[in-house]
Amino acid sequence: MIRITQAARLWAILLLAVLAPATLSAAPFAAYVIDARTGQPIYKQNEDTRLHPASLTKMMTLYMAFTAVERGQVRLDSQFPVSSNAAAEPPSKLGLRAGQRIELRYLIRAAAIKSANDAATAIGEGLAGSEEAFAQQMTQMARALGMRNTNFRNAHGLTQEGHYSTAHDMTILGRRLFYDFPQYYNIFSRRSADAGIAQVSSTNKRFLDAYEGADGIKTGYTRAAGFNLTASAQRGNKRLVATVLGGTSTAHRNQVMAQLLDAGFSRVPNRVREVRPEAPRLLAQRVVRRAQVAPSAAATAPEPQRLVLSASAPPVRVSRPTLASTAAVVETAPEAAPVGGLSLTASARPVSRRAPVAVAEAPAVETAPVPQSASLAAPVLAASARPVPAPRSRPTASIAAPQAVNPGAEPEAIARAVAEAVPQDGGASMSLLASPAPKPRSETVILAAMGEGDLADPEALEIVSRPSNSGRGWGVTLGMFKSKAEAEKLLLRSALQDGAILGGAQRHVADTKRGFQPSFANLTKANAELVCERFISRSQECQVVGR
């Protein structure tokens, strides 16, 4: 009972300390404190009131930049152009000039540490093409993270109509930065950094130096918003994230934040089950386009137009020359067209086919006159010499291509036409015994046709072998350590943290005169560069080595 009374008294004193200066502020006051390990709230005051977030907006700008890097859309060394709009942003600013190009890593440092407005605008325009499009993407991401009372209109946070957020939503975003991007989170605890064109100092340096365990995150100030701060601090196993909106000064804001965190650390248990936030669920916007067809005169007429097919001329059929086989005889038109007549209109309609008539072997009979063929190629075929039949053991009436006969001919006429093709001279015997013996084969074997230049001796073939891990001959080295255990510990921790890239890499610790040097091998060049960027962002020395 005594402990409950003391806790209630502490919160009453804290509430008076918060409300007393807030009454003098032009901006409304709001505060929200949560246990970062579970996301459970510890203290609330106007947490869902929509207020001006000021430069706390840059937390979402940086969240979008980290997301783009991790998805491979951009790299930390990607060159971003600086537009005249970005260069004209009011202070605080890095001092960018319109037309210049600067690496994304420097823009991130300037926006996170110095809270540079021109750097934040350059990030948004570089990622989305325009600041308006980037603001829409920021709002969509906020919805995916559970920030229900937030709407962004710019990337820097300067006061603008329709640009607002709450203490609750900014605290949720601060926790997300810690859990979703631990490899980049240490940037919020830096007191200074190299931003490419200048050395920048942290706007949160006072609170980071004054409060034990503080390691971020972001400050903000405008006349309409007051002095804002989203902070994160750790003591032992406990970690809290809190937001203060509407402070009257930097000192007042830091004092209220320290009191909120002290009271929060005294209330939360030392050990709890950690509940990490789920991955954001981004909703894809579906655009449905409906085609609109302008009405035509035919469609709107009371009586639609009609197409009369009976008025068209009937197609003229064309007779085609056919080849008869030994198994079937194809009938031709009763009246054959003249040889020289090429007029399609003069051709007769084809007669329907009858059942095929099998032709058996027939003895040689007297030659009967063959009627003129209707084929256009008949004159050429008549003038050409007939091929000599292949030798057989006995005469046969089988032929390769007999001439077509009249459709009304009797079977006897067909037999005479077939027999005509068989030579009747007794001197040309078709017996295999009378055929000349084949000539012996040549022993020379021609493998392939060769040109004039192929007669020389062929050149010796050069055999080029590639290792099985072609393309993965890159690696990274991670500085020097005094003991082998420290080097192996770094390799193991890095492999667990970046398992997607380092899962198939080979770990090695080299014992050199200067110390123990850990390294990863068997990486592609792209993965080696990406791993090095992540190590450098964690303040770990890293160098890419390759073939």
Image: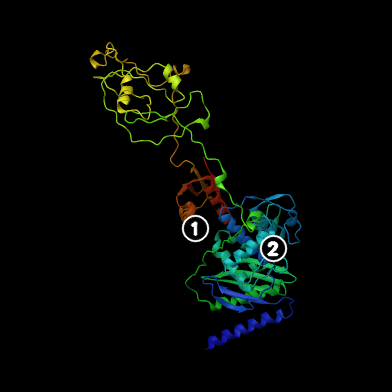
From the viewer's perspective, tell me whether residue 471 is left or right of residue 80.
Answer: left
Element on which disc 1 rests: helix
Residue on which the image places disc 1: 497
From the viewer's perspective, tell me whether residue 96 is left or right of residue 356.
Answer: right
Q: Residues within 10 Å of mark 1 (few under 14, many from 20)?
A: some
| Residue 76 % position (x, y) | 61, 52
| Residue 157 % position (x, y) | 70, 65
First of labels 1, 2 by sequence position: 2
Q: Nearer the viewer, residue 448 or 107?
A: 448
Element on which disc 2 rests: loop
Q: Nearer the viewer, residue 494 or 509?
A: 494
Q: Nearer the viewer, mark 1 or mark 2?
A: 2
Q: Nearer the viewer, residue 59 or 448?
A: 448
Please tell me which residue is depicted at 32% across the width and 25% down the height of the picture. Answer: 413
Please tell me which residue is depicted at 69% across the width and 63% down the height of the picture. Answer: 154
| Residue 190 % position (x, y) | 63, 61
* Colour setup of the view: rainbow
Identify residue type, mark 1.
Gln
Q: Quadrant of residue 105?
A: bottom right
Residue on which the image places disc 2: 154
Q: Is residue 10 visible?
A: yes
| Residue 539 % position (x, y) | 58, 56
Q: Is residue 235 above or below residue 4?
A: above
Identify residue type, mark 2.
Asn
Q: Are marks 1 and 2 in contact (CB under 8 Å)?
A: no
Q: CA distance from mark 1 to mark 2?
A: 34 Å
